């Protein structure tokens, strides 16, 4: 007796319910079969839109109110760098009016500092240094006028008129260390030479000495 297995009406093995993903399906009415897309993938390429496009660059423009070129005026006789002010104004995105205010502020500060330094220098050269010379035990006191003559002669002999003028205008002719140095040179000159001069020459030197050391004139 033989065993016969019932294969059903069609004679084909029964497919799993629902079919398998990715397996070709046969549409009705004889239409061509199409392969199913893998799970998670679709036919649309919408997700790839925009790929490969060249990114656009934005041009940096000056901030609103910042001019292409500043028109700044510097008032007063002070040394201030205009390019430095313009650079600072541009970094701060200042308008022309604001940059002018900045320049005016800087000029005012520099001017005030300059005036302060000038006043301090004048105090040194006309008050403090002459007082130190007058009180100095070596070159001051009763010997101050004579040492002033020696200092002037040394400056005139080795420096000439230009050197004498520079010392006088700068105020360094009153500096105690400079005065002592020139007086020592003049003293060495006087010891090595005997100078005779007529009355007119002596009067001329006295006048120039009075201009060189006005604080020593009585």
Image (spheres, helix red, strand yellow):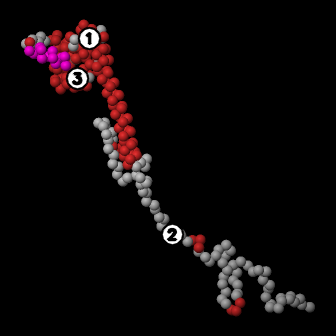
Estimate the x, y position of residue 99 in percent, counting from the top left. 38, 45
Who's the residue at 41% across and 48% down the image?
A: 94
Who's the residue at 34% across and 51% down the image?
A: 69
Which disc is residue 52 wearing?
2
Q: Is residue 109 visible?
A: yes
Residue 169 lies in the magenta-colored region: no
Mark whose residue sits in front, 2 or 1: 1
Who's the residue at 16% across and 18% down the image?
A: 208
Q: Main secondary structure of the magenta part?
A: helix
Q: SS at mark 2? A: loop
Which disc is residue 168 wearing?
3
Going from N to C along the chain, the mark reached first, 2 or 3, is 2
Q: Is residue 147 visible?
A: no
Residue tagged 1 = 139
Instruction: Using a 10 Å C-alpha cutoff, classify the residue at mark 3 as few (fewer than 14 neighbours), some (14 to 19) or many (20 or more).
Output: some
- Count of labels in the image: 3
Estimate the x, y position of residue 84 in percent, counting from the top left. 36, 43
Answer with left or right where residue 2 lies relative to residue 194: right
Q: Which residues are magenta?
A: 200-211
Answer with left or right where residue 180 lies relative to residue 41: left
146 and 3: which is toward the camera: 146
């Amino acid at each position: 007796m033989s065993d016969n297995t019932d294969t059903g009406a069609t004679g084909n093995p029964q497919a799993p319910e629902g079919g398998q993903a990715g397996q070709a399906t046969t549409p009705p009415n004889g239409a061509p079969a199409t392969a199913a897309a893998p799970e998670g993938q679709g036919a649309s390429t919408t997700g790839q839109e925009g790929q490969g496009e060249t990114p656009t660059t934005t041009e940096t423009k000056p901030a609103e109110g910042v001019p292409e070129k500043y028109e700044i005026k510097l008032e007063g006789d002070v040394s201030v760098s205009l390019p430095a002010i313009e650079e600072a104004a541009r970094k701060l995105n200042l308008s022309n009016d604001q940059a002018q205010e900045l320049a005016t502020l800087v000029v005012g500060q520099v001017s005030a500092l300059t005036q302060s330094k000038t006043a301090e220098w004048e105090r040194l050269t006309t008050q403090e240094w002459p007082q130190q010379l007058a009180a100095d035990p070596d070159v001051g006191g009763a010997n101050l006028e004579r040492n002033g003559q020696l200092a002037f002669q040394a400056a005139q002999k080795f420096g000439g008129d230009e050197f004498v003028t520079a010392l006088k205008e700068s105020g360094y002719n009153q500096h105690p260390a400079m005065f002592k140095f020139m007086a020592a040179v003049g003293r060495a000159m006087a010891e090595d030479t005997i100078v005779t001069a007529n009355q007119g020459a002596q009067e001329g030197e006295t006048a120039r000495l009075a201009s060189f050391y006005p604080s020593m004139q009585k």
